[in-house]
Each structure stands twice: as structure tokens, then as C-alpha cells.
Image (cartoon, rainbow, N blue to C red):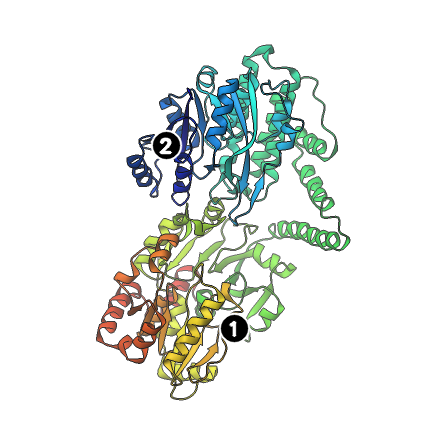
């Protein structure tokens, strides 16, 4: 077939998904292909992946940009080098469907359109694949093989991204448009492409796999860059105005309605426009309405028309009030579901209003709010800081946030608490001077000027965290822009060692002050006595003389409850009744039941125990895989055995900061029999294991002297 198609692939931060994209392109047939991949100064391993593929297949050319230019700049760089009759822009985190190029090439050869629009599917992180919901707008009834936008204006109702449009290269180059900078960079090209095209064709076949809800995608990220949309809108209307009467009034109105709808959708979608920029975004939307409103424009009917009227007047408060009512009105129709959701919706609206009112109250300089593990209870470093602050800064009242009354009742006697989302909770969250947590507070919490946020975190990192997860499947639908907004609230970040300081300041870049004090939660371990050990064992019901092993692995994909049960029962049988196994499941594996073992070690499930420090004190030895608990347990200077049957797989999929097996805290095993022998033979406690543990402690426990809490309190609070 005498047809050459240039496929341009902008690449940035998609290391885990890039091979799938490239494989889908290189497997295509049916036309002469020119593949141009533009490495947009990607911070991960994308450059090496591209070069390796290029070495294997001469159809792929790689362009390495010296500095990041964004999607628009990368596409421009690729287009400059393209030589094909047609050009197709494919994002590096998406892929083409099997046979897509052959089907596209056949249609291009038949009708030689200016623009060929293809159907597509949406793929989600959980494996779901959905068809294009806009397809019927254009395919029912089927359009002619070639048409103009005026003949099929419904095309404007479909997605306006560039990736489902194959464009005649000479037509694009002579159109006088280019991809913009920032977010929504392609709409300043796609609208003009369709408006000016004399020959459009539609291929009613899914050719493109569009990955939705990927972490870092603009449709799933909070960022000031969402305001870039208005610059792209301006370019669209500059193009229309430059054509004079070349655009029918009806099409101009459709384009205008579509851009206003896009702006309203971005504004209304939770988590996209940062809180501090929402007023500016709405004002910009009002300005867009004023500047580009077509002559004789009439508002659409229904709720959309009311929204547009609020936008036109700049009535942001009225927009929100109407929007809240409309969200309730459009809840599911089932009577029970509608009632329950309506109540929840009304409560959420009321909470927002009450919280905003409390924010107007003076800040309480002597109030501190504490929380841990998403309000699960009194634990970790926040609890240690709370106790030390009561001693050294008694003028500051501490209040704990818990998920429910049952969690509050379980707190130590004398500890004040509030239940999340109640009026007392809203008041303390709005007025407290100090906020201490080992995870982030909800996004709805406002960082008041003068307030002090202390982020203690909850473990020394082995696996990648924060921004270092970009492009990895393990990130799931993680919103990195939202994460950075949370980090921007931190005033202090507590770290236990230089390794953690380096890892966290890279994974969570911000303006906070690092307190490399040691982890406050480990003060109990550093100051532990033999009596503490015996008390912890007695509280757990450990038999006198039994050797206690704490089993505490992290969660790993592919480890099923049945596999975990098999491992533990096999270990219990191998060790015998001289041992007690304390089993602490990861919270994602809660509910895994381990049956008693005849003629084996006694098994105690301590997954629900409120204090992991007590479990560490009771244990003679820790068995783990990649859990950060190994760094805490090392403070006790007791044996640690690693059970790591899938290290290379875990290292590749999750990403790690250092090679654990090159510098382990003790013996390393990969099978249950090997693990059992290392324990029962005493090898886990021999001289070589002790040497490894000492080197591990020197690296990761340099500040664990029992005074980390004091150092944090003296830096943060007004000490008496």
C-alpha cells in the first residue's frame, strides 16, 4: 500500500506502561510506518527503554529533548521530524488496538481525508474496559464516508483529544496552528482541524486504547495548570475569527458551548482545581463567556442553562448553591438509596458550611490535634509526641481524632478525643494551632496561616514512596498533584535517619523543615528493659519459656490468604511446640484465619493488637519480608530473619531505594524450610547475623536513644 503513516509518541514518566505502548505499535502491519518517540526529558527509565527498542527495530527513531517541554512541546518536536503522508499522535501510556493501523490505512487509501476520526475504548486500573460512550452521537445513523463538520456537527460532542484523529500531515502544517503549552494542549489543534477540514471520515472501529484514571493524568490530578485551558480556548477562537465567515454561526455556537461545558466540568470535578485557585478559575470562566459569547446567543435549557447563567454573571455563590441542590436531585432513584444518599449529601453540605464558619474563629494557640493511621486510634509517633508534649508543654491541650466512639473508648484514660466529622471535630480542626499526624489529614482540611502541621510518617522506606511511584503500576490511581498539595501544608517532617531524609525529601518535595530526630514511636524500644519484655509477653498470654517469633510481612500482590495460611502452618509444624508465633497480618490481609497446628508452634493472631511496640518487646525474633517494621525492631538489637521468596519481582514492580539483600539485617531465606532451619538451628542469632544487624543498626538507627519525642516537642511546641 503506497501510504506512509508517521506515529508520534510523546514520552514522560511512563516507564511501567511504555513497553506495552511500543509493543502495540511495532506489532502493527498494513502500512509503511515511521515511529518517532520523543523522550520529553523523562525522569525515570523511559530513555533507556526507548533506546533499547530503537536498537531492535529501525522503524523507531528516538528524539531526546534536553529539557521537559510538556505534551505540546513534545508533539511539536515529533511533528517537525515526521515525513509520512499522515500523522497519528499516540500517548506513551496508551496503546493501539490489534489491527488498528491496517484498518486505518485501508480507509485512508480509499478516501484520502484531511482528518480520520477513529473509535476507541477506555481502560481502567482495575482491568475494566468500556466502549466509547459518545459513539452513537456520530455512528447512529452512520455518516457518509466523507463529510464536513457542518454536515455532522455532532462530532463536536465526542472527545476532542488528538489521539483518536489521524491527520493528513500537509493539511496540519498549512493550517497555521500548533499544540499549546501546559494542560489541554491538543484542543487548540483539534478544534481547528475539524472546523477547517473539507474531508472528514469516521472509522467505526475501536483503534485506540485510552487509559483512564492513571495517576498523574491531567483528568485525575489537582494542579494550577488546569487554568491553562483558557489560553487554549483563546487560540481556538482566534482561529475562528481569523477565518472570517469561514465558520458557520451554528458551529461557532457549538464550539462556544463545548468550551464552556469543559470549563464547568473541570471546575465541578472534585480534586482538579486547587482550593486556593477555584475563585480565579471561576472568574476566568466568566471572562471567557464574556469575551467569546456569540452574537444572538441564547442559553441552553435545564440545569446546564442555569449553570451557564451563573457563569455569565460571575455568580459563584449562586452556582455553588444550585450545584449542591442539583447533586442531591440527581442521586439514584431507588427510594432507600435516594434517602440515604440525600441525607449523606445534606450532611456533607452542612459540614462544609459549619467548617467554613469555624475557620473564622480565632486560632487556639494552645490546642493540638493528633491522629494516626486514618483515625484508627492512638498509635505510632503521634502518640509518643502527645505523651511527651503533655510533660514538656502542658499549656497545650491535645485532642485525638478517632473514626468512631468505639475507637475513642479504647484510648488510654485521660486522653481527650473527638469523632471524625462531628461538630467538635470540625471545631478543633478549624481552630487548632498544631496538627500532628503520621498520614495526611483529609484534603478538605484548610491550612490556616500560622498553624503548624507536623508530619511524622510511619516507617523507614525500603520501597518507593510519593513521587518516586510515578509510572509504576503499584501507584494505582494515585493523584500526585493532590499529594503535593498535602505536602505543601507540612511545616515539619520527622525522619529517623539520613537514608529516610534523602528518600522522603525527594519523594515529597516541599518547603518544610526536616527534623531528623529518630522516630518518636521507637523511644519505648530504645529504653526497653527486661521487665518491659516480660510484661508484654504476659499481657499476650505467652507461655513461660516459649521462644517468641513475630511474623509481620508487608502486603504483596499475588500473596493470597490460602498461600499465607500454607506458609504459616508449614512454619509452625517445622518449628515445633517450643515456639509461639505472633502473627500480625497487614491490614489489607485482615481476616486471614490460621487454624491451630497439631504438634507445632502455638499460633496467636495479634493483627488487632493496638500497639506494635508491645509486640516487638515480646518477641525474641522478627520474621518479615519488606516491611518497615524491620527498621524499628532493629532498635532492640534482637535477631531478624528475612523471608523473601519474590525479591526480584517485588524490587521490579514496587521499586526500592536500596538492595536489601546486599545489606540485610540478618539471615536471608527464600523457602519456609530454609526459614525454619535458620531459626531452629540458631543461625539467625549467630555471629555473622549479629554483624549484619550491627551494620544495619548503624545505618538506620543512629538517633534511637529514647529521646526522639523530646527533640520533636522542644522544636515544635512552647516548652515550659
Q: CA distance from mark 2 to mark 1?
A: 50 Å
Q: Quadrant of residue 644?
A: bottom left
The quadrant in which the N terminus is found is top left
- Image coordinates of residue 409 in percent, x first then y, are 59, 73
- Would you say 625 lies left or right of 210 here? left
Residue positioned 50% across, 42% down in the render:
221
Classify mark 1: helix, strand or loop: loop
Residue underneath mark 2:
37
Q: Residue extending furthest bottom?
A: 544
The quadrant in which the C terminus is found is bottom left
Can residue 80 be seen at all in this image of the molecule? yes
Of 10 and 228, nearer the camera is 10
Up-down relation of residue 620 to residue 634 (above or below): below
Which badge, 2 or 1, is on the more N-terminal residue?
2
Residue underneath mark 1:
593
- Would you say 658 lies left or right of 406 here? left
Up-down relation of residue 136 to residue 421 (above or below): above
Q: Quadrant of residue 52?
A: top left
Of 704 and 707, nearer the camera is 704
- Image coordinates of residue 669 in percent, x first then y, are 31, 68
- Image coordinates of residue 320 in percent, x first then y, are 67, 40
Residue positioned 53% across, 74% down in the render:
412
Up-down relation of residue 50 to residue 167 (above or below): below
Q: Residue extending furthest right?
A: 335
Classify mark 2: helix, strand or loop: strand
**Residues packed near mark 2 inside 10 Å, few (<14), some (14 to 19) or many (20 plus):** many
Can residue 618 be seen at all in this image of the molecule? no
Amino acid at each position: 500500500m503506497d501510504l506512509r503513516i508517521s506515529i508520534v509518541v510523546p514520552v514522560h514518566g511512563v516507564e511501567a506502561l511504555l513497553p506495552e505502548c511500543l509493543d502495540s505499535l511495532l506489532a502493527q502491519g498494513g502500512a509503511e510506518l515511521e515511529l518517532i518517540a520523543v523522550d520529553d526529558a523523562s525522569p525515570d527509565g523511559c530513555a533507556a527503554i526507548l533506546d533499547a527498542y530503537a536498537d531492535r527495530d529501525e522503524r523507531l527513531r528516538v528524539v531526546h529533548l534536553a529539557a521537559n517541554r510538556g505534551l505540546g512541546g513534545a508533539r511539536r518536536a515529533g511533528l517537525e521530524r515526521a515525513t509520512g503522508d499522515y500523522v497519528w499522535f499516540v500517548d506513551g501510556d496508551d496503546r493501539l488496538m490489534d489491527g488498528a493501523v491496517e484498518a486505518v490505512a485501508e480507509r485512508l487509501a480509499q478516501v484520502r481525508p484531511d482528518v480520520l476520526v477513529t473509535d476507541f475504548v477506555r481502560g481502567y486500573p482495575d482491568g475494566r474496559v468500556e466502549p466509547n460512550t459518545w459513539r452513537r452521537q456520530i455512528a447512529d445513523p452512520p455518516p457518509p464516508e466523507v463529510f464536513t463538520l457542518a454536515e455532522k456537527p455532532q462530532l463536536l460532542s465526542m472527545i476532542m483529544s488528538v489521539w483518536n484523529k489521524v491527520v493528513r500531515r500537509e493539511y496540519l502544517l498549512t493550517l497555521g496552528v500548533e499544540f499549546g503549552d501546559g494542560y489541554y494542549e491538543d484542543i487548540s489543534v483539534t478544534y481547528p482541524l475539524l472546523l477547517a477540514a473539507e474531508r472528514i471520515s469516521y472509522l467505526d472501529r475501536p483503534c485506540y486504547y485510552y487509559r483512564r484514571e492513571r495517576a498523574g493524568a491531567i483528568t485525575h490530578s489537582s494542579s494550577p495548570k488546569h487554568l491553562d485551558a483558557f489560553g487554549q480556548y483563546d487560540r481556538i477562537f482566534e482561529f475562528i475569527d481569523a477565518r472570517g465567515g469561514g465558520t458557520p454561526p451554528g458551529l461557532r455556537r457549538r464550539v462556544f458551548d463545548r468550551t464552556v461545558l469543559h470549563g464547568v466540568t473541570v471546575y465541578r470535578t472534585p480534586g482538579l482545581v486547587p482550593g486556593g485557585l477555584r475563585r480565579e478559575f471561576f472568574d476566568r470562566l466568566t471572562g471567557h463567556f464574556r469575551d467569546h459569547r456569540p452574537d444572538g446567543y441564547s442559553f441552553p435549557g435545564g440545569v446546564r442553562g442555569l449553570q451557564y447563567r451563573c457563569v455569565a454573571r460571575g455568580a459563584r455563590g449562586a452556582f455553588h448553591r444550585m450545584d449542591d441542590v442539583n447533586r442531591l436531585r440527581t442521586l439514584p432513584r431507588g427510594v432507600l438509596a435516594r434517602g440515604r444518599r440525600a441525607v449523606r449529601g445534606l450532611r456533607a453540605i452542612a459540614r462544609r458550611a459549619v467548617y467554613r464558619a469555624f475557620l473564622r474563629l480565632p486560632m487556639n494557640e494552645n490546642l493540638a490535634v493528633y491522629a494516626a493511621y486514618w483515625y484508627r486510634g492512638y498509635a505510632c509517633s503521634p502518640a509518643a509526641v502527645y505523651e511527651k508534649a503533655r510533660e514538656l508543654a502542658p499549656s497545650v491541650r491535645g485532642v485525638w481524632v478517632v473514626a468512631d466512639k468505639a475507637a475513642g473508648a479504647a484510648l488510654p484514660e485521660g486522653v481527650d478525643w473527638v469523632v471524625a466529622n462531628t461538630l467538635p471535630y470540625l471545631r478543633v480542626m478549624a481552630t487548632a494551632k498544631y496538627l500532628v499526624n503520621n498520614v495526611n489529614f483529609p484534603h478538605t482540611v484548610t491550612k490556616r496561616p500560622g498553624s503548624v502541621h507536623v508530619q511524622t510518617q510511619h516507617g523507614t522506606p525500603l520501597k518507593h514512596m510519593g513521587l518516586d511511584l510515578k509510572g509504576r503500576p503499584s501507584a494505582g490511581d494515585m493523584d500526585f498533584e493532590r499529594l503535593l498539595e498535602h505536602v505543601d501544608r507540612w511545616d515539619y517532617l520527622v525522619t529517623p535517619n539520613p537514608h529516610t531524609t534523602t528518600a522522603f525529601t525527594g519523594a515529597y518535595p516541599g518547603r518544610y523543615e526536616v527534623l531528623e530526630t529518630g522516630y518518636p514511636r521507637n523511644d519505648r524500644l530504645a529504653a526497653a528493659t527486661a521487665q518491659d519484655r516480660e510484661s508484654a509477653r504476659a499481657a499476650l498470654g505467652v507461655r513461660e519459656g516459649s521462644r517468641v517469633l513475630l511474623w509481620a510481612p508487608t502486603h504483596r500482590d499475588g500473596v493470597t490468604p490460602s498461600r499465607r495460611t500454607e506458609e504459616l502452618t508449614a512454619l509452625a509444624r517445622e518449628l515445633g511446640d517450643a515456639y509461639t508465633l505472633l502473627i500480625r497480618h497487614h491490614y489489607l490481609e485482615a481476616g486471614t484465619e490460621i487454624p491451630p497446628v497439631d504438634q507445632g508452634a502455638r499460633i496467636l493472631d495479634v493483627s488487632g493488637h493496638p500497639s506494635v511496640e508491645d509486640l516487638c518487646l515480646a518477641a525474641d525474633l522478627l520474621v518479615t519480608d519488606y516491611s518497615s517494621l524491620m527498621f524499628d525492631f532493629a532498635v532492640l538489637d534482637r535477631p531478624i530473619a528475612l523471608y523473601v521468596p519474590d525479591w526480584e519481582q517485588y524490587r521490579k514492580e514496587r521499586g526500592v531505594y536500596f538492595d536489601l539483600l546486599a545489606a540485610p539485617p540478618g539471615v536471608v531465606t527464600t523457602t519456609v524450610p530454609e526459614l525454619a532451619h535458620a531459626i531452629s538451628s540458631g543461625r539467625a542469632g549467630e555471629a555473622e547475623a549479629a554483624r549484619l544487624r550491627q551494620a544495619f543498626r548503624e545505618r538506620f538507627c543512629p538517633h534511637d536513644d529514647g529521646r526522639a519525642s523530646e527533640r520533636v516537642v522542644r522544636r515544635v511546641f512552647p516548652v515550659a
